[in-house]
Amino acid sequence: MAKKQSQLTVDDRVFVGRVEEQKQFRAALAETLNPPAGENLPYVFLLYGDGGIGKTTLAKRFRDIALQEAPFKDKVQMLWIDWEDERKKFPELQVGREQIQAEDVFDVIRAAAVRNRWGRQFVAYTKALKQTAEAKQQVAEMLTTGDKSDE
């Protein structure tokens, strides 16, 4: 009697194919387990491509590999950001791709990190945001009051 092979699923849906992509992801992820000496910055994996080709499902498969398979299980932390979900929350992202500012992207990443209790990773960025806001306020005040020394 033949042994029944279990089906691979992603979010309770059968997942087939993308064998080469999974292999490449495992290889890239394995490299992150032993980074070069002195390199302690996080790694970022981004997927991009035309709509409707299965990027989200593939990303979820990568998530499952990173969080559930040896040797990665319990060695990888993941911050999951679904850009389409974030676009609904942030009006700054509801524009054409060319009009999205870098600061808006960082704000979205920071907000997702804070929601996932990773806020401590953004202390320096939060401080820089505060300093920038204060500087903008000072400039605005100077512009609205004018230079009184000319009178």
Image: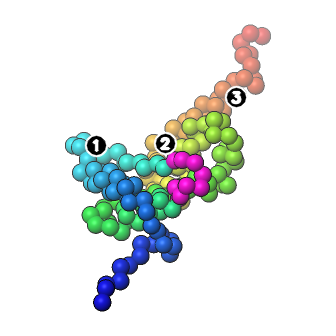
Closer to the camera, 124 or 77?
Answer: 77
Q: Secondary structure at mark 2?
A: helix
Disc 1 to disc 3: CB gap under 8 Å = no
Classify 8 as above or below 27. Answer: below
Disc on res. 140: 3
Which residue is labeled 2 in the image?
A: 125
Q: Residue at x 22, y 43 (%)?
A: 37
Q: Residue at x 60, y 42 (%)?
A: 104
Which residue is labeled 1 in the image?
A: 39
Few, some or many C-alpha atoms within 10 Å of disc 1 (few <14, some 14-19, many ≥20)?
few
**Residue type at mark 1?**
Glu
Q: Distance from label 2 to label 3 (Cα)?
A: 22 Å
What colouring method underlies this structural image? rainbow
Region in magenta: 48-56
Question: Which numbered mark, 1 or 3, is in the foreground of this view?
Answer: 1
Question: Which numbered mark, 2 or 3, is in the foreground of this view?
Answer: 2
So how many labels did they put on this image? 3
